[in-house]
Each structure stands twice: as C-alpha cells, then as structure tokens.
Amino acid sequence: MDLDLIHSPSNYGLSFYTSESSKSNEVRDYTSWIAALPPAINILTEPKNIVLRQGEEQLVFSEFETSLSNNVTSITFDNGSNYSFEGLNVSVKRFHPTLFKIHVSPQSSVGVYDIPLVASMLIQTTSSKLPVFNDTVTGNTNPEFQISKKYPTIDYITTKANLTIEVLPPLTLSETFMGYWHTWGDAVALIVAGAVGAFATFAMDLLKKQKGII
C-alpha cells in the first residue's frame, strides 16, 4: 500500500485489540504498540561535533530522538556495553539524558570514527509523540485510537545508529601558546600596559627629584 496516497505518515504505530460486550459492559484487550517501520534515530550531541585529541577524555551529553519516542532504555555497541577500538573507548554513563564517556589514548589513530550502536526506545500508547491518524475524508480522529488511550500499553523499538567521533593529534607548542593567548591575551596586555604606565610614572617622579637635587 502506498501510504502517501492515503496521507498517512511514513512511520506509524499499530495496536491490535479484541473486544467482548454484554449489554452496557465491554472488555477490551490491546496488544503492545508496534512500530512500522522502525524509525531512524537522530542523535543530538553537545557539543554538536565530537572532536577529541589524542590523550583526551570527555563527557558528552546526547539526546536520542525518533518520530515515535525519545525514551531510551538501553544502548549497546557491537562488542557489548562498551566500545573499544585502537585505544578509543566509549561507555554509557547515563540514559536520561544520555551521557557518554569518551577516552582517547595517545596511541589512537587520527581520523573519523563512525561507531555503530543499537538503541532500544520505549513506545507508549499515551505518548504525545505518536502521530494521530485522522480520517482523510472527515478529518476526525479515529475513535478507536481515542479509546486505546484509556488502556495504555507499551512496547520497544530497537534500531541502529552511528555515533561519530573525530580524533585529532595533540596540540603543538605554538598551538598551545596561541590558544592561551586567545583566552588570556587581552588580560595580559592590560596588566602589562598598567605595569608599564606605573613604571613610567615612577621613573618620571624619580627624574624630577634628581633634577631638584642637582
């Protein structure tokens, strides 16, 4: 089925149910919420571009978002709960918000690392992120969808993503000096200017005294 022809979202959720009624009483049984197709994960990090130099360590805050959920329940790498390759180590310290600890050894190769990971996201029928399917003719929300909100169920989607890290060589002596000067240069210049001014005043006073004595 071409979803675009019926104005449906490219990613949506499915929930099946059975109902039995007797007079005014009704019993419904809903299945877990199923994602179709499993949505792609968008990883937002702070800083946006993760750049470390050989020998550095950094904590990186991240947010995992999909069209159906942003509630991360687990993150795993290809080789387990931690990632390690050529001295580059990545571990998950926290899920909410996600916090990565990244360590780069002095022996790690310089370059860009695309680290594959698998994240599990919690889906709830009561989530505000779930798209609402409206009837294409009337524009009204399907009443069965509204009823399902009264009987919330959960499920998980598991999908792949990449965490990109760039490794650079250590700062050279000149780069370290330039960085120091960029940060403290104005303050140092003010201090030096003040010291020169004070010394000039002192020298002039001393010269005047000497002339007075002569």
Image (cartoon, rainbow, N blue to C red):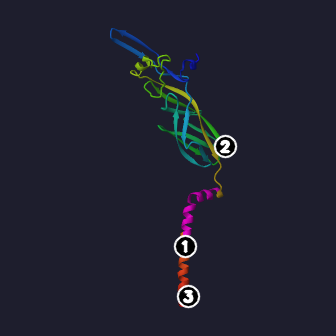
Image location (x, y in percent) of residue 177: 62, 59
Tell me if residue 112 comes above or below residue 72 in the rendering: below
Q: Amino acid at mark 2?
A: Gly
Q: What residue occupies the far right of the structure in this picture?
A: 110
The majority secondary structure of the magenta stretch comes to helix
* Residue at (39, 10) in percent of width and height: 20
Image location (x, y in percent) of residue 169: 65, 49
Residue 64 vs residue 4, the one in the foreground:
4
**For the magenta stretch, what is the residue range?**
175-193
Q: Which comes before the other along the chain, label 3 or label 2?
A: 2
Image location (x, y in percent) of residue 162: 60, 34
Residue under circle 2? 111
Q: Residues within 10 Å of mark 1 (few under 14, many from 20)?
A: few
Label 3 element class = helix
Residue under circle 3? 211
Q: Residues within 10 Å of mark 2 (few under 14, many from 20)?
A: few
Residue under circle 1? 197
